Image (tube, rainbow, N blue to C red):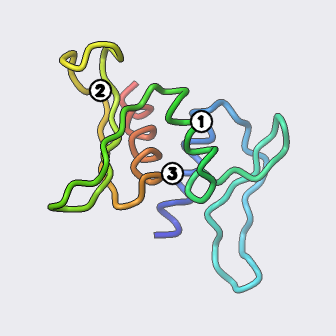
Amino acid sequence: MADDVLELTKKCAEAMGFIICARDMLDQDGFVPRVVYVSNPYRRYDPFLDAAQAFELLCKFKLHISPPDEQDGRWEAYTLRDPLDPDSGVTAHALDESLNIAIMKCIVELQDGR
């Protein structure tokens, strides 16, 4: 899953308009981390663990979220053709047990569809 999260993180950074400066190759335990470093300003970017960064994605791309239901326990993140009209149709949609991952997956689907 770490590789998947790293790719989601990279694509979300690009969607936000950040320039990716570097990616850690291995952390001290020999695992590939899920973060990238971006410029303007230079910082660590990790919307998987940083709720504020995930919230930036949610707001910038006008995502809607629905809490987990009792059947599958997954968060839903989606975008609408017209953010003010709930009947306008969905343009991107993602489900995940993690709210932040659902947001990230939705952003990637939205970007891939453009």
Tally the numbered discs.
Answer: 3
Element marked by disc 3: helix
Q: Is residue 90 left or right of residue 98?
A: left
Tell me the quadrant of the picture where the N terminus can be found.
Answer: bottom left
Q: Is residue 71 left or right of residue 94?
A: left
Q: Quadrant of residue 83?
A: top left
Q: According to the image, label 2 marks what residue? A: 91
- The answer for how far apart the CA atoms under marks 3 and 1 are is 15 Å
Q: Residue furthest bottom?
A: 29
Q: Position of residue 108 (x, y in %)?
A: 44, 40
Q: Amino acid at mark 2?
A: Thr
Q: According to the image, label 1 marks what residue? A: 56
Q: Amino acid at mark 1?
A: Glu
Q: Is residue 106 left or right of residue 45?
A: left
Tell me the quadrant of the picture where the C terminus can be found.
Answer: top left
Q: Position of residue 18 (x, y in %)?
A: 70, 35
- The answer for how far apart the CA atoms under marks 3 and 2 are is 18 Å
For marks 3 and 1, the one nearer the N-term is: 3
Which mark is nearer the camera, 1 or 2?
A: 1
Q: Position of residue 27 (x, y in %)?
A: 73, 76
Q: Amino acid at mark 3?
A: Leu
For marks 1 and 2, the one nearer the N-term is: 1
Taking the spot 50% from the left edge, 35% from the top edge, the residue there is 58
For marks 3 and 2, the one nearer the N-term is: 3
- State the mark number for residue 8: 3
Q: Is residue 105 above or below residue 40?
A: below
- Contact between marks 3 and 1 (CB within 8 A): the answer is no
Which mark is nearer the camera, 3 or 1?
A: 1
